Amino acid sequence: MFNVTGILKRLVIGRAMRSEELHETLLPKRLALPVFASDPLSSVAYATQEILLVLTLGGLAYLHFAPWIAAAVVALMTVVVLSYRQVVHAYPSGGGSYEVVSTNLGPSAGLVVAASLLVDYVMTVAVSVASGVDNIISALPQLAPHRVLLAIGFVAALTATNLRGVRESGRAFAAPTYLFVGGVLIMVITGLVRCALGDAPVAESAGYGITAAPADADLAGPALLMLVLRAFSSGCTALTGVEAISNGVPAFRKPKSANAAATLAVMGITAVVLFVGVTALALITKVRITGDPCRLTGLTGSCSAYTQRTVIAQIAAAVFGGEHSLGFYLIQTVTALVLILAANTAFNGFPLLASILAQHRFLPHQLHNRGDRLAFSNGILALAIVACLLLWGFRANVTSLIHLYILGVFTSFTLSQLGMVRHWNGELRAEHAPARRRHHHTARVINTIGAVVTGLVLVIVLATKFTQGAWLAVLAAVVLWVMMRGIRRHYDVTSAELAVTDPKAELTSPSRVLAIVLVSTLHKPTLRALAYARALRPDRLEALTVSVDRDEAAALRGRWEEYGIEVPLKVIDSPYREVTRPVVEYVRSVRRESPRDIVAVIVPEYVVGHWWENLLHNQSALWLKNRLLFTPGVMVTSVPWQLTSAAHADRPAARAPGSVRRGEPRGPAPRRHR
Amino acid sequence: MFNVTGILKRLVIGRAMRSEELHETLLPKRLALPVFASDPLSSVAYATQEILLVLTLGGLAYLHFAPWIAAAVVALMTVVVLSYRQVVHAYPSGGGSYEVVSTNLGPSAGLVVAASLLVDYVMTVAVSVASGVDNIISALPQLAPHRVLLAIGFVAALTATNLRGVRESGRAFAAPTYLFVGGVLIMVITGLVRCALGDAPVAESAGYGITAAPADADLAGPALLMLVLRAFSSGCTALTGVEAISNGVPAFRKPKSANAAATLAVMGITAVVLFVGVTALALITKVRITGDPCRLTGLTGSCSAYTQRTVIAQIAAAVFGGEHSLGFYLIQTVTALVLILAANTAFNGFPLLASILAQHRFLPHQLHNRGDRLAFSNGILALAIVACLLLWGFRANVTSLIHLYILGVFTSFTLSQLGMVRHWNGELRAEHAPARRRHHHTARVINTIGAVVTGLVLVIVLATKFTQGAWLAVLAAVVLWVMMRGIRRHYDVTSAELAVTDPKAELTSPSRVLAIVLVSTLHKPTLRALAYARALRPDRLEALTVSVDRDEAAALRGRWEEYGIEVPLKVIDSPYREVTRPVVEYVRSVRRESPRDIVAVIVPEYVVGHWWENLLHNQSALWLKNRLLFTPGVMVTSVPWQLTSAAHADRPAARAPGSVRRGEPRGPAPRRHR
């Protein structure tokens, strides 16, 4: 069994790596772009669609707001990218927004950012995978019933890829991202050229009308503004993941900051071009899309049986000549691939941030341990599990999931820009060279604009999305925030308690050792324990048994004498069939009598090799040892006796190195019985 | 937390009992009848219905077979009760069928019976509870959507009652059983009297017709025979649980056998009277019931919305004046109660049988331990869990579940009657007194008839039910059988290996003790471990640390010297960030150098009080200790250091006695960290 799991692990995760190999996993720009930017790039595939979905709530007439909303999103993207270039230069150590805010606005504000980002990383995985599955279903509608299963399967595949380590992830994900960017660019150019030549492509749904949703018909004044703001909020999904590069600076090759800033710029320009192109084509081809297909007019057949394709699928079909054209299938393939891989941005960001938080003792230590392949395995697994739960709970529905999204992103945008403003204030106080001061002034202006704009968007998003599901994301972030503070407090209290105060006194040995061998029956393990206990030459040695059955106890005493065991045997009666309590009480009474001595409790155990064998033996030795650990002045010694079946599990020099640091066993765990 | 669970446990389970109190839980006949016979008595509530459900597959015309099938069931019941009276007298020790077959036909055949019975006990719980819920829904149709939840809730309630111990169970269940018997008798007499007076009651469904199921229309010859045999198989559910009394003889007051035989006779007569009465009334009132309501003709409204009441509910409504009469509600209440409590027969039988099997080392030891209230707690819990899974998997549908049922019962009937024949053969060989020989001859004739008849029924049940679900029960029994043999083999091998062969040699102490203190950081627990290790005065003492980070190791060495610790510190490098493997390898190398000595590995640990605190600390100490137990010639010593939070969990003399024998912790388990 061990062999199989060990080999499987090697196959999935790859060869274990030495700590010194860490620098080899650094990323060149051409790999960093797909690794960190597949999220903002791929959101082109759904950002336009989400804008249209909201606007068509009011009917087709409201679509004329779409260009303006797209323009606002582009402006916002520009501001955010410019702002984050400042962050990357000022903080090359990769804490990203978390580090910026912690340093400049204090650890509590930093934790707000951390909690928001952790929640949004999870949402990135869920939304991207769900949207990827949507695009697969657009090409292969017969897969529609398996939506959730597909989504969870893709998360599992991503998890395995990421457990192999950062660099391999970059390689696996570079091609699809570049293919997606290239494919969508070709699609946009083809569409625009056809349009310029007077042969504008027409979407399959262009002929349909859309009736307004009852609550959103004939809007005016504040209600209309609200609808437009909701559409804008949805469009802001295009901005998610921009901060991933700033969190991942340490993964870049040197000069880290410059490379990261350049990657950020390329990413921003590409995302803007794709987003504008797709939105323009959606309007040109007259794509009709709505949250409820039964509001479509002009349908032939039942509305409930009609499956709407995604916006990008409809555009691809229109531009390349129908839903059976090669171009359509190619675009759908790379779109689905890049969306599912966009989740990878979170698989890079989440474990890194969790590891930094663990290092700062806001999350459990285990999240800071690198796995065999130098990836943060525990963080990767945590992310995958929560994302799968979300996908399952929301039936992998993009529009439901998207309501929980982007709130965290804009919280961290706003706070980190605020933090940067404060950072430049500090720098300006310390700096006197005019050229440097000018630079700092410009940077401060950029970050101030960034803070104001993203803060405004945050308010808009909160106002328009809170009741639609965003409350859940807020709640999750608050719970995380409280939990992380609690964890930090626990670690602080513990390490204060454990700190050495008086080494001389603490190193003073107790005067005597009183040894007690626990006996249940007289078999080889017991005799070995007695022999070992004698080898320790304690000041006093006795054997202790708990009698739950008088006959058994008498038989035990008989064999004790028959074997000529010289250690005195003490029998405690236990009419209530307990074992642990009488033993603990006896040990305490011994301690009370001689408080300056220590009691060494020696437990004979036999060790079996198969996990299932443990089900066949009482676990009383384990419980007893656990209970005794609570008793002050006691040391608990196991004397193991290895059964034949345990031998196969004892392979100290197993095939491959690695894996143990994060608390994972090399083979099946041995088990103990008294 | 501990307090609450402790108090809750006392409230649900009651005060713990001393082992000597066992005899106080013996049952008088008036309590033994409801405890052991609620299953066969309550099956009256569904046996008739299952016969009708099968017959109406062929349409209403086939209902004229019903009286003949009922007569066959009555005859079978008589044979089985008479046969089991012989068993009770011959084997008063309560192994029931299992003991009879093991003794007379060998342990493998005995295990077949045991496996069959274990499966059928589970089915008893599932079928009885599901049928009880059906009768509740007959009275309160608005509960229909909560069928599964109700069923699982009742199993949970039964589990709690049974964890309180046998006698209390008897008390809790006596009243409903007697009320059910009385209520159904009154219903039958009232119905028959009304019929005799010319005012025959008419069921609510009497006006409907039933169209034959397509596969079963116009049957003749073998197909018709098959349908009748299927109906008979279904009717045989009335016989389940008859063997419970023979398994439970030791729970009777003295004279145990006579009392058990008398109870068996009363149970048989009562069951026959009720079954005949209900079947007669079902035919008189013209109850129409079918597996698929859409085969009913003459319905007003949609067939899919029509909820059929159970047969007993329809009769009660007809006899007592409608489904809002007091009589109807009373009958439904006691029927539902007794059905749910019938599951209790299995809650008595299953743990007792499992305990006997555990004593014979065919099942894990744990099933032989009595809990606080002298009931076999682990067996009760195992039964409850499997039954809940079945109820959940089959959506608490009686007709689906019933296909898995009674196969095991008839397997054990047949084998135990065969065993009894062999038993009398043996007795006859040894016996020479003519009066005793006559008795044995008569008994052998009874058991031979029993064996032939039940064997025939077993074949019929297998033939008619195998493809309908009984294969699952067969598979489960086969798996159990194989597993029990494997467990026995494991125990035999283990105890042979552990047996003392040469006490003198095995008691010889090793010549020297080499102590190694494991160090990760220098905190109070480490200093305490060093101090305790010195108190053991080993022949050699050293400290060992694994360096996964050079700077940390250097810092550790610096503080080591600063504190003036005289124990030499050995540092092992671990470039692959492992801890366990280098330590195990080092320990092995020490052992190799001096194979006649023992290595005492001393692990400093700190103990926290809350389970969640363990999530915040690496479990490497635990894994390391586990791995070391596999290494021959090593003893592993934990030196605990109790954090403040551990103090609240350390309550050696907790409020109530009990509970520890079966491996259950008194409070939260303490946890350890290095």
Image (tube, coloured by chain):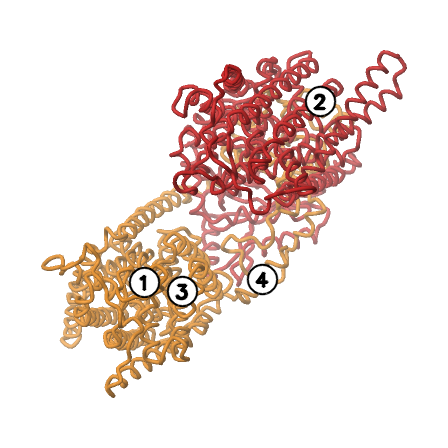
Chain colours: A red, B orange
Residue marked by disc 2: A84
Label 2: element kind:
helix
Chain of the residue displaying label 3: B
Q: Nearer the viewer, mark 3 or mark 2?
A: 2
Q: Say which amino acid is labelled 2.
A: Tyr
Dot 4: within a 10 Å radius of its alpha carbon, few (fewer than 14), some, or many (20 or more) residues?
A: few
Name the quadrant containing residue B179.
bottom left
- In x, y percent, where is residue B134? 38, 65
Crowding around mark 3 (Cα neighbors within 10 Å: few <14, some 14 to 19, many 20+) is many
Which numbered tag is attached to residue A35? none
Pointer 1 or 4: first along the chain = 4
Q: Earlier in the sequence, mark 1 or mark 3?
A: 1
Residue B470 is situated, as x and y percent measured from the top left of the image, at: 27, 53
Q: Are marks 3 and 2 on the same chain?
A: no
3D distance between C-alphas at marks 1 and 4: 34 Å
CA–CA distance in space, label 4 to label 3 = 27 Å
Disc 4 marks which residue? B8
Instruction: Write down the residue under mark 1.
Output: B95
* Nearest-to-viewer mark from 4 and 3: 3
The correct choice, above or below, for A68 with respect to B443 in the image is above
Residue labelled with disc 3: B133
Front label number (1 vs 3): 3
Asked whether residue B69 appears in the rendered view, the answer is yes
User: In 3D space, how far apart are the residues under numbered discs 3 and 2 (Cα atoms)?
Assistant: 63 Å
| Front one among A62 and A546 | A62
Letter of the chain that mark 4 sits on in the rendering? B
Would you say A62 lies left or right of A641 here? Answer: right
Q: Are marks 1 and 4 in contact (CB under 8 Å)?
A: no
Q: CA distance from mark 2 to mark 4?
A: 56 Å
What is the quadrant of the N terminus of chain B in the image?
bottom right
Do callouts 1 and 3 point to residues on the same chain? yes
